[in-house]
Image (cartoon, rainbow, N blue to C red):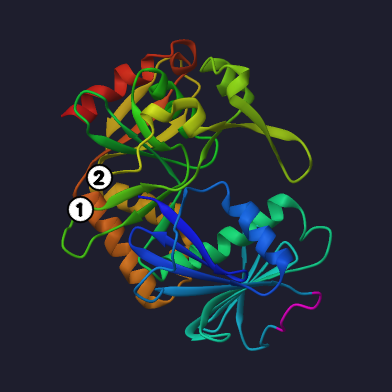
Amino acid sequence: MSIAICSSNPNTSYYRVADRIIKIKTLDSWSATLLENSLNDYVFEHLIAAPRPAPDICVKAEVKACLSRIPAQTEVFDISQGRCHHDGTNFWLEVCDSLVIVKSAPDFGHCDVEIQFGETSLAQEPLSIETVCLYGFQFALRRCGLYIFHAAAVSEPQSGRSALIIGDSGCGKSTLTVQLINCGWQFLNDDAILLCKPSISHQVNAYSFRRFLAVTDKSAVACQLPPRLQTNVVSDDGLVYKRRVDVNGSFGGQHRASCDPQTLIFASIVESETSEIIEIAQADAMMRLLAANPWSTYETRVISREYVSVLQSLVRGSKTYEFRAGQDILKFIPQASKLLKPIIQR
């Protein structure tokens, strides 16, 4: 899969994602620059003409000194780095001194999602801009049947069969991905992929979504990543906490655009010396997937139902395991491949 962009005029761009088309309208040069810089971390292919047919959804972006007022009669709950207000069908996300508005019926001059960048110092920080853009595009993509999913996706080189490695931040997804790459495995990404279910098939497709891997210093050392492949990623408190690894420049020959996952692996790090793989019931796997995606509980009923259907199809078509990664994974690079290859080849 590729995401493609073209500019038909200075304020309009088009993106294609898995045959869906997203129109981007920017109302000022600053917001255009912010979006362009943010989206550089994702996979783009330039188009030479405006796409046809009409876009599936439209996203508008602008910089505003005074953000739009949120209606008073809404439910409010906390989300990562902000708060979400909703009235059952429409959403207002206050994130990093900016605002994302999602309307169930197209508004804003035929726009479905509006991103309003604030003018405060917090709103202008690079990580704040990236966070706000991702929230906006997550809502837009879900309305096109595409779901950003936090998992690593890898393919075993001999069988060509693919697996998703799922877990919270710090569970070892990136370390396992890089170690498997070092053993010749192909990959989509270590943390950010797209899921969708074609209407003519029950098989769930996974697509690459991010241009880089992000690994901790400890993992970079354990995986023997050359320093030339790494650039810094800066956290919101100004401290370097992960290393960016460009997928094309580093492992271009092993990078895949898409795959059909047939194994789900729920990863965690344990204190024991020896790693362990345990087969789990599909019902258990489904509960874990729902717990890992809390947004599905506050989306519209239609979108939540469609997303749950994608997860159900993913689980039904996969073998499901828990991988408890011990110290042997860091001490012996081929160990992850040695343990995972037999269950994926089955």
Q: Which residues are magenta?
A: 65-69
Residue 251 sits above or below residue 210 on the image: above
Residue nearest the viewer, comparing 70 with 267: 70
Among the two numbered marks 1 and 2 on one chain, the one whose residue lies closer to the N terminus: 1
Residue 68 sits above or below residue 218 on the image: below
User: Would you say residue 310 sits in the magenta stretch?
Assistant: no
**Circle 1: is it few (<14), some (14-19), or many (20+) Cα within 10 Å?**
some
Q: Residue 47: which quarter of the image?
A: bottom left
Tell me where residue 281 appears, x and y as whole percent. Answer: 24, 44
Assign the C terminus to one quadrant of the image: top left
Tell me where residue 21 appears, x and y as whole percent. Answer: 40, 67
**Circle 2: is it few (<14), some (14-19), or many (20+) Cα within 10 Å?**
many
Query: Can you identify the residue that label 2 sits on?
Result: 260
Tell me where residue 272 appears, x and y as whole percent. Answer: 46, 18
Alpha carbon separation for disc pair 1 and 2: 7 Å
Query: Can you identify the residue that label 1 sits on?
Result: 203
Q: Residue furthest front?
A: 48
Amino acid on which the number 2 mark rests in the picture: Asp
Q: What residue sits 56% from the left and 23% below the top?
A: 219
Amino acid on which the number 1 mark rests in the picture: Gln
Residue 172 visible in the shown view: no
Relative to 101, 271 lies left or right: left
